[in-house]
Amino acid sequence: FPVTILNQKNKKEKFLEALPKEFNRQKYLEVANVLSISTKSAEAYITEFVKKNLVHREQKDQYIRILGQLDCSFVNVLY
């Protein structure tokens, strides 16, 4: 019998998908709190998302999420 692997998203993926199209630090920390992600981790994730062009930093404290929803082609970018 073939084994089916469920595609379960990790916290980082859930966080990215939960962010609105445009957001600031306060908003991403609210999202992180709902997902039980610490402030420090959320800040690190945002920094990583910006470096990987998943989120654009428009100006100080203003971000734009590049991706609509994650799909398999983008999941590998997170690692």
Image: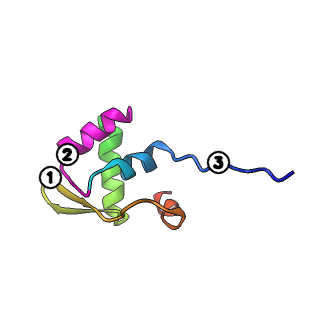
Q: Is 29 one of the magenta-colored residues?
A: yes
Q: Tag 3 or tag 2, which sits nearer the N-term?
A: 3
> Label 2 to label 3, Cα distance in Å?
32 Å
Q: Which residue is mark 1?
A: 61
Where is mark 2, residue-wise?
25
Instruction: Looking at this view, name the residue that lies furthest to the right.
Output: 1
Sequence-wise, which precedes: disc 3 or disc 1?
Answer: 3
Q: Amino acid at mark 1?
A: Asp
Name the residue beneath numbered marker 3.
6
Colour pattern of the rendering: rainbow
Three-letter code for the amino acid on which mark 2 is drawn: Arg
42 up-or-down from 36: above or below? below
> Which numbered marker is on residue 22?
none
> Which of the pair 19/56 is nearer the observer?
19
Q: Which percent across, then down, holds residue 22?
A: 21, 56
Residue 76 in percent (x, y) is at: 53, 62
Q: Gap in Å between the C-alphas at discs 3 and 1?
A: 36 Å
Residue 34 in sight in this render: yes
Amino acid on which disc 3 is placed: Leu
Tell us which disc is closer to us: 2 or 3: 3
